[in-house]
Image (cartoon, rainbow, N blue to C red):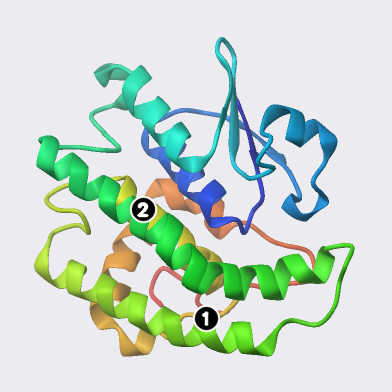
Amino acid sequence: MPTLLHYPLDPFSRSIRLALAECGIEAMLTEEKPWEWRAALLEINPAGSLPVLITDEEGPVAGAYAIAEYLDETLDQDEQRGFRLFPGNRAARAEARRLVDWFHRKMSDEVTAYLVEEKVYRRFAPSGGSPNIEAIRAGHENLRYHLTYISHLAETRPWLAGEALSFADLAAAAHLSSLDYLGEVPWEDYDAAKSWYALLKSRPSFRPLLSDRVAGFIPSGTYADLDF
């Protein structure tokens, strides 16, 4: 059985947990605290980032992008049970990859890094200190921009990248679920994004994420509520 090094509120880790579940792959979860920069993690992934999938036969695969491509390329159709992380023709797959980059790079840099890292990582990091209020304010403002874009995509397509559920949906949902745990998502102002997220939230792959708990942080009232 493969092992996934992850942190519960890390959106990159969450996207791979969703991907593994959608592909029907069981993995052992080992929690890694990203702010500790453990030597053992750096030996496996010199970037020190999560997630890392340690496979039984081919060793470690580091990073959400690499793991997603690895899963999509190495699993045959029967093992995937009909699910593809990057489905459709070349244009459809390119669009899914574009949106994965949007959420895992742009939204991460502009929103999740500000809110999750400032509120959670900084609290536990050795350097400590109070959250950067300006960074949190910027994260709140940028989140509305991204929710507007997600709403636009959800209103014009069956799924974010097109006709089929893809890794783009899982990446976006991973970031929003981390933020929703902290009560940071103004769902009431974005009905289309909320309806799209509710569909994903009700999938079996999402159940383990909804049971996550992080010491020192109580999840928001809407976090595990499927009828939020």
What numbered label is drawn on residue 139?
1
The answer to the question of whether label 2 and label 1 lie on touching residues, with beta carbons closer than 8 A, is: no
Image height check: is 60 above or below 194? above
Residue 173 x/y as whole percent? 40, 60
Circle 2 residue: 101
Residue 94 visible in the current orientation = yes
Name the residue at 55% across, 13% down.
58
- Kind of residue sitting beneath label 1: Gly
Say whether residue 210 is left or right of residue 3: left
Q: Position of residue 41 (x, y in %)?
A: 75, 35
Q: Position of residue 138 (x, y in %)?
A: 53, 85
* Label 1 element class: helix
Label 2 residue SS: helix
Question: In which quadrant of the rendered image does the N terminus lie?
Answer: top right
Residue 127: x %, y % from top left? 88, 67
Residue at image x 55%, y 65%? 178
